[in-house]
Image (spheres, rainbow, N blue to C red):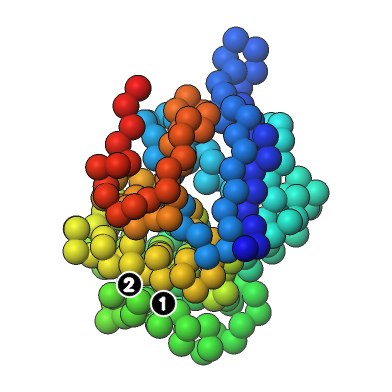
Amino acid sequence: MRQILELASVTKTYGSGDTTVAALRDVSFGVEAGEFVAVMGPSGSGKSSLLALAGGLDMASHGEVYIQDTPLSSLGLAELARIRRRAVGYVFQDFNLIPTLTAVENAALPLELEGWKPSKAHRVARNALRQVGIEHLADRFMDQLSGGQQQRVAIARAIIGERSLILADEPTGALDSVTGNGVLEVLRERADAGAAVVMVTHEPRHAAWADRVVFLKDGRIVDQSSVQGDPNSLLVTG
């Protein structure tokens, strides 16, 4: 299988001198096309930092991040923005939606930034909203949507188009169990269709949708497990 994402001996530190904090320490991690990987670990273990580096939203202090064999450190700002628009779908914990745009306009934005005609982009965006169960809310603005509905708009924006890498930071956090399972099914379907999917979660039952679970602690990968469908097998102590 083709590897879509690779973190090669990545370290990420913040601050300097006595205030230096290492969010990630010499992490090597890869995800192939068609693979769904869940990332788990306690608060402060480096999960969100790993996603930010994987999506080119932050740069490694040491080591290298590759998307489709392209080293991100070699890219200028414009090239980095382009690869994020074309290849990477990102679900943020705080959604990062534009309040002056409707749900369909938010979901369609990555395509329009790539030069798609609005009519075509909106048609594809409505289909993405349908996949997450809110096509009927396509023309509403963000202040007219609940937190859970906004989260589904963010997920629709992440899965739209031909994204080869989908990164999701607690994508079911604001959703009830039934709706959350629907979102996980969408992510599973995208992986089965050939995308590489990385999801941060603290719920073993959500991680059970993945092919593999990576456990972080204190900025290091401490374990990796193949998922056998039993959420209890994903519990790690220590």
Q: Between marks 2 and 1, how big is the CA–CA gap?
A: 7 Å
Where residue 106 appears, x then y in whole percent? 45, 70
- Callout 2: SS: loop
- Towards the viewer: 181 or 134: 181
Query: What residue is drawn where x is 59% and y is 27%?
Result: 25
Where residue 124 appears, x then y in whole percent? 47, 83
Q: Which mark is residue 132?
A: 2
Are dots 2 and 1 in contact, CB under 8 Å?
Answer: yes
Q: Amino acid at mark 1?
A: Ala
- Towards the viewer: 40 or 210: 210
Q: Amino acid at mark 2?
A: Val
Q: Is residue 45 above or below residue 68?
A: above
Q: Is residue 65 above or below residue 33?
A: above
- Towards the viewer: 227 or 47: 227
Disc 2: CA contacts within 10 A as few (<14), some (14-19) or many (>=20): many
Where residue 155 appears, x then y in whole percent? 40, 64
Where residue 156 appears, x then y in whole percent? 41, 70
Q: Is residue 27 above or below residue 74?
A: above
Query: What residue is drawn where x is 59% and y is 86%?
Result: 117
Along the horizontal axis of the image, is 106 left or right of 66? left
Quarter location, residue 210 = bottom left
Along the horizontal axis of the image, is 140 left or right of 218? left
Quarter location, residue 12 = top right
Disc 1: CA contacts within 10 A as few (<14), some (14-19) or many (>=20): many
Disc 1 designates what residue?
128
Query: What residue is drawn where x is 46% and y is 87%?
Result: 123
Quadrant location, the N terminus: bottom right
Along the horizontal axis of the image, is 73 left or right of 199? right
Quarter location, residue 24 = top right
